[in-house]
Amino acid sequence: MKRVMDIGASALLLVILAFPLLAIALLILAKDGSPAVFKQQRIGRHGRPFSILKFRTMKVSAPEKQAVTSGDTDPRITPLGMHLRRHRLDELPQLFNVFKGDMSFVGPRPEVPEYVDLESPLWQKALSVRPGITGPDALAFRDEGKALSQAKNADAHYRAHILPSKLAMQAEYAEQRSLAGDLMVLFRTLGVFRG
């Protein structure tokens, strides 16, 4: 049932948002060059890797070694990219991920491979469902960029202080998910997007 809803809603939104998606892509190309869309490997349901899609918000020459950004003050983020991130518009291409089946609208936010331990029971629980564009962990840590920008080492801070809490929330979501709960997360997310 959830997958059917994901397919229908993502297809409808891709049609409705076709012009804004194209406009944002063209704006990125005009201001920051090619490519307009950024692909990064993430770990999905049952530990399967997939390419998450986002509008590119960093300089083309930015090194890709660092898995997590150093927050809102990361010098790799372009001025346009900062605006897109602030309003969560960089996440819109993930509608294609939802339509394809890599993601759902609601679920744990997918992590890059270097943060995932496939042998851990907690990770296995979190990865038992499709990752989401939004979820309880995404809402709880929507301002993590501020915390990371104040940390001496963003990657170490993320691993030690943010990821464990996120993972616990993701595992709890996987165990207790429901349609009513997903709708509540979506309504809360739309409230955040308006703010």
Image (cartoon, rainbow, N blue to C red):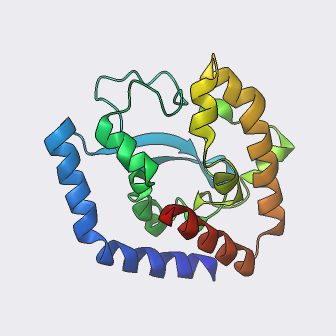
Q: Does residue 166 lie above or below 94 as drawn?
A: above
Is residue 87 at all visible to an observer of this figure?
yes
Using residue 59 as the reference point, say whether residue 126 is left or right of it.
right
- Residue visible at 71% across and 28% down? 159
Image quarter of residue 29:
top left
Q: Does residue 99 lie above or below 64 as drawn?
A: below
Image quarter of residue 82:
top left
Toward the viewer: 178 or 47? 178
Residue 128 in the image: x percent, y percent?
Answer: 73, 57
Toward the viewer: 71 or 171? 71
- Which quadrant holds the N terminus? bottom right
- Residue visible at 19% across and 50% down? 27
Toward the viewer: 96 or 158? 158
The outermost residue toward the left is 30
The outermost residue toward the top is 152
Using residue 69 as the reference point, say whether residue 148 is left or right of it.
right
Toward the viewer: 8 or 148? 148
Q: Does residue 49 lie above or below 161 as drawn?
A: below
Residue 40 in the image: x percent, y percent?
Answer: 45, 40
- Residue visible at 20% across and 59% down? 23
Is residue 117 at all visible to an observer of this figure?
no
Query: Tag count in the figure?
Result: 0
- Residue visible at 47% across and 28% down? 73
Image quarter of residue 2:
bottom right
Residue 195 in the image: x percent, y percent?
Answer: 51, 61
